[in-house]
Amino acid sequence: MIRHGLTDEQWELVSPHIAPRKARTGRPPKDPRLMLDGILWVLATGAPWRDLPERFGSFKTVHGYFSRWRSAGVFAEIIEALQVKLDAQGKIDWELWCVDGAVVRASRAAAGADKKVLPSTRTNPKITRWAAREAGLDRNSIWSLTVREIR
């Protein structure tokens, strides 16, 4: 079994939802299982499409399949079918919801970058030395630097 690839049992569950592609050129279409394995490799590793191993074929071809299947709703259909099957087996707890924070991208503003807001419309109050002192904060480099207005 190839790492990050589908087993035969998994492919049997997924394959009915992937319509066979008819070639529009003289070349035969790629194997949909190989294309799905390539897509899963990129999604599992987080690597750029250009770093896709050669065993899956051209990264442009695999990305093309990914884009078409995503637009056609193939992945949503597969997820829904798997949820129905697992729910029938009693393996889904609908009371439990989890979000994997490893794949949630933060905005630039979350890292301290300026937001795209005019200075005249900002609502955050400026920090002053007396406010920090009243809040019981010791003098340190962090609040001393935030007091000054950066132009």
Image (cartoon, helix red, strand yellow):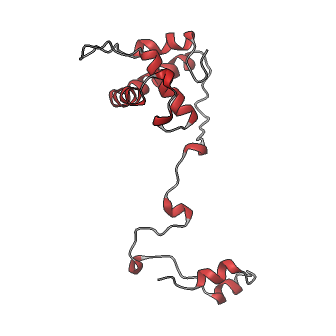
Q: Is residue 146 left or right of residue 135?
A: left
Q: Looking at the picture, how far across and down is residue 19, in whole percent? A: 35, 15
Nearest to the observer: residue 50 or residue 121: 50
| Image quadrant containing the N terminus | top right
What is the residue that sits farthest to the bottom in this orientation? Answer: 130
Q: Position of residue 82 (x, y in %)?
A: 51, 20
**Residue 84 relative to residue 135: left or right:** left
Q: Is residue 9 above or below residue 52?
A: above
- Which residue is at the front of the view, 117 or 41? 41
Q: Quadrant of residue 127?
A: bottom right
**In this picture, is 82 found above or below 105?**
above
Give 149 or 1, whichever is nearer the viewer. 1
Q: Is residue 142 left or right of residue 107?
A: right
The residue at the far front in this view is: 54
Q: Residue at x 60, y 80 (%)?
A: 146
Residue at 40% over, 71% down: 117
* Whether residue 139 is situated above or below residue 80 in the rendered picture: below
Q: How many marks?
A: 0
Q: Position of residue 14 (x, y in %)?
A: 47, 16
Residue 15 location (% of width, % of height): 44, 13
Which residue is pictured at 39% across the width and 24% down the height? 74
Location of residue 131 by image quarter: bottom right
